Amino acid sequence: MPVRVAVDALGGDRGPLEIVSGARDAASAELTPVIFGPAELDTLGLEHVVTDGVIEMEDKPADAVRAKPDASLVRAARAVGDGAADVVVSAGNTGAMLAAGLLHIRRLPGVHRPGIAVVIPSVKGPLVLIDGGANADARPEHLVQFAHMGTLFSHDVLGVATPSVGLLSIGEEAEKGNQLTREAHEALIEADVRFVGNVEGRKLLEGGVDVLVCDGFTGNVALKTLEGTIATLLTSLREEIASTMTGKLGGLLIRPATRRLRTKLDPDTYGGAYLLGLRGLMVIAHGSSSSQAIANAIRLGAAGVEHGIVAALAERLPARTQPQT
Amino acid sequence: MPVRVAVDALGGDRGPLEIVSGARDAASAELTPVIFGPAELDTLGLEHVVTDGVIEMEDKPADAVRAKPDASLVRAARAVGDGAADVVVSAGNTGAMLAAGLLHIRRLPGVHRPGIAVVIPSVKGPLVLIDGGANADARPEHLVQFAHMGTLFSHDVLGVATPSVGLLSIGEEAEKGNQLTREAHEALIEADVRFVGNVEGRKLLEGGVDVLVCDGFTGNVALKTLEGTIATLLTSLREEIASTMTGKLGGLLIRPATRRLRTKLDPDTYGGAYLLGLRGLMVIAHGSSSSQAIANAIRLGAAGVEHGIVAALAERLPARTQPQT
């Protein structure tokens, strides 16, 4: 049986055709994309569930998900809740994905809060940052649960034998940080994960830890700083090089090198992030995703299904964490 | 009268000679460095205050400052509190600088918390991030006060006519963020600053706002992510280029361009950050500062004195902010 991936055709900044085209590229004997979008959409021959309405980026997530039950994003999420699809992929409103997931897929037993697990292609290998932005405010026990989720993800999907877990903070010493990280640090020492201590923001691209735990606000600020810095630096470098003739010639000669580096560090390599902690799998793609990024996000979703990540979390997570107080 | 700069010779990762050498380079008819360090130190002819003891990077700041009253960092801070020097510069323990400042220089009337103001050399011009790490936990009224401090700094020292103020958050919409930023957003709308709304982490290097306000935890994570990403990316690019013969030749040709870019984005350009909100001025330099960075930090300190930043804060800050509740 091929994996069925519910694809929200609306919500991406580049329009539905970019998304449908990515879905077509990802389709294979093992992977059936199902397009959720309006009747008039050309789905290039892919299976089509006709939907009515769209969740906008500016919409208030929880309100919009309730007010627009037939919008493409909501219907696609519901398909996973109903068992009609194995995983949902959307480049739309992240908050609405979370709200639709909580409403129509629901939390796994024992899970306090779902978390967004983002794979960063660091220099020393893939690093799972969790939470990338699902919960702007978090408590220490949430961070401990993110550590468990990230460990399972790193082990089961990325194949790391005993993943190391770091806590994103402002200094390596245990007492460095804010109230949340100081309490989480203590709790992580007691937790059944391979906790290696606090880690600073410089490690995001450098790597050196398998799982990086943080609240969703800090994680999102750090991710956007990382992505923005890479983009701005490479653009500035190109402009600086193009400002002289010698530079231009040099630029031609190093183009293969910069292209290799871009590919290595490109966030589109993974195409999206998992929303973990629900009874079904959701993949959140960048709003600006190209068709290639969407294809990768769809393949990422299928890989998560094949690795049985939800079943693994359901089986191993409650036993490893404290009940909610 | 030349500006007298109290320089803590200990604390820098590269040893006291690097710091003394930077101080000697910064010395001029308008600037007198005074070296605070042990008797055996060669101060290259600079004025020398003999101190006893050192605050280590691992020391608990408040305890260490009380337990080691004659340590170089503490004595240098006290010199500003006593009026023996106009500004203190240290590449040592940031927390100890804050503790020594609170104890021996003391807060300006009306100031809730001092904040670290870091100048980021963004592509669109200098951007003042405040707080860069003085207070890991903050309340909305602290962020409003940081907005006022940053505005004064941007105006008086950097010469920006009417500085724009952004709030570092995870989306541009007012409701995007955590509890702190949502409340601070409302308060900043009411405040007498040119508030332009929420700003994402990608703007740190790209620029586009004059003052970027945040709590010290978020600010420090973002700054270290920024610096680490620039360093890792440029190193990776060099390695990628050096991996082929063509790349090596291209690398030689673009070297002037990469050098210009490095100079433009180098955090050592400013050499240090101001700790604002005290009755005297403190400059915090990077632990890894080169002698050149130390010289720049010392000049930065002298510039702050010449611009009368403390007097300006004393005069204009209390009138512009709410009393502490």
Image (spheres, coloured by chain):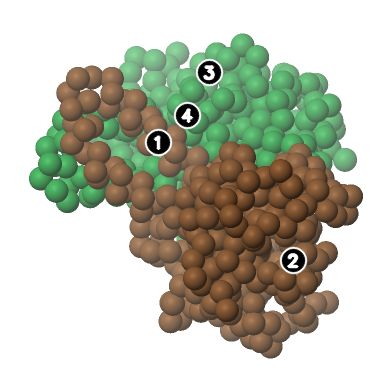
Chain colours: A brown, B green
Between marks 4 and 2 in the image, the one whose residue lies nearer the viewer: 2
Q: CA distance from mark 4 to mark 1?
A: 10 Å
From the viewer's side, name the closer residue of B87 and B213.
B213
Q: Quick check: A133 left or right of A70?
A: left
Q: Quick check: A29 left or right of B129?
A: left
Residue B200 in the image: x percent, y percent? 61, 39
| Label 4 with label 2: CB-CB less than 8 Å | no
| Label 4 with label 1: CB-CB less than 8 Å | no
Q: CA distance from mark 3 to mark 1?
A: 24 Å
Label for residue A79? 2
Residue named by callout 3: B158
Q: Residues within 10 Å of mark 1 (few under 14, many from 20)?
A: many
The numbered mark, 3 or 4, whose residue comes first in the sequence reads 4
Q: Quick check: B235 left or right of A14?
A: left
Between marks 3 and 1 in the image, the one whose residue lies nearer the viewer: 1
> The residue tagged with tag 1: helix, strand or loop?
helix
Q: Chain ID for label 4?
A: B
